[in-house]
Image: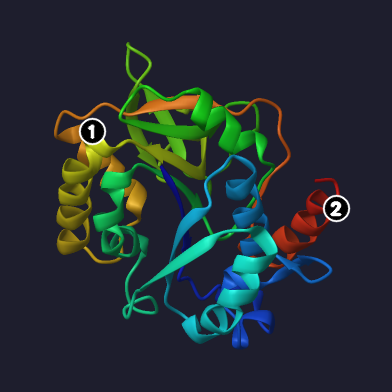
Amino acid sequence: MIGMVLAAGAGRRLRPYTDTLPKALVPVDGETTILDIALGNLAQVGLTEVVVVVGYRAEAVERRKAALEERHGVSLTLVHNDKAEEWNNAYSLWLAREHFAEGVLLVNGDTVHPVSVEKTLLAARGPEIVLAVDDVKALADEEMKVTLDESGHLARITKLMDPATAHGEYIGATLIEPSAADRLADALKATWENDPDLYYEDGYQEFVNRGGKIAIAPIGSVEWVEVDNHDDLEKARRIAKGY
């Protein structure tokens, strides 16, 4: 199994940091960036081969590649998304499809969370796809929410859901087993071909709609944040200091 980080996004709401850097390279603790935390977490659970999908300001990641590898004891493979500023991340994840067959622990490059999330996902291995879900946090309109079917598998995943009906929030971390590789790639392809502005979570919904099963793993009472704006960044800086 390998690690994977989606780090192609521009993060325009984080300017001026993202005038010259992708969101994943915004610092959250001194010189420690969001990408540093992601790579450190993956390395701590033994995933030292890591694919990073880059796009916006990819050259900034390329310049730091050797230093990141040395700092975290990882080997990085960069996958380039030349449409990162035009299309959404369903296409980004699809571009890395050839690596799914190795088994992947995927994390979003704009999420700050502790290594307990990776440990929770690895402990839940068995189902073909497992999503890390926060079922403790109070939800609002912006979160990527999930509902479950009668068997406890994913029924629906979308931001466009009444928070009161949701089971919890998908936090941007997924375990993908090799057996799901081809069908997930096909679902992602159908998703971005239908609308390139869709999220990879819409690809998960397509996977479920086609009869696939996606399990969830509750992460417990954990401090984490998706860094979309400057308020989120301040929270990330507070959280990161406690890791």
Q: How busy is the neighbourhood of tag 1: few (under 14 within 10 Å), some, or many (20 plus)?
A: some
Could you tell me residue 52's position as x and y percent?
45, 64
Q: Which residue is mark 1?
A: 208
Task: Assign the N terminus to one quadrant of the image.
Answer: top left
Residue at horizontal 15 percent and vertical 60 percent from the top: 194
Residue at horizontal 66 percent and vertical 53 percent from the top: 40
Residue 134 in the image: above or below residue 233: above
User: Is residue 167 at all visible to an observer of this figure?
Assistant: no
Taking depth in this image into account, of 22 and 145 the one nearest to the observer is 22
Residue at horizontal 14 percent and vertical 34 percent from the top: 210
| Label 2–label 1 contact, CB within 8 A | no
- Give residue 189's mark: none
Could you tell me residue 84's position as x and y percent?
38, 75
Could you tell me residue 26's position as x and y percent?
68, 72
Side of 152 relative to 113 (left or right): left
Pick whichever of labels 2 and 1 is earlier in the sequence: 1
- Secondary structure beneath label 2: loop
Q: Which residue is mark 2?
A: 241
Name the amino acid, label 2. Answer: Lys
Taking depth in this image into account, of 30 and 160 the one nearest to the observer is 30
Side of 83 relative to 206 (left or right): right
Marks 2/1: CA distance?
38 Å
Looking at the rendered image, the disc whose residue lies closer to the viewer, 2 or 1, is 2
Image quadrant of residue 176?
top left
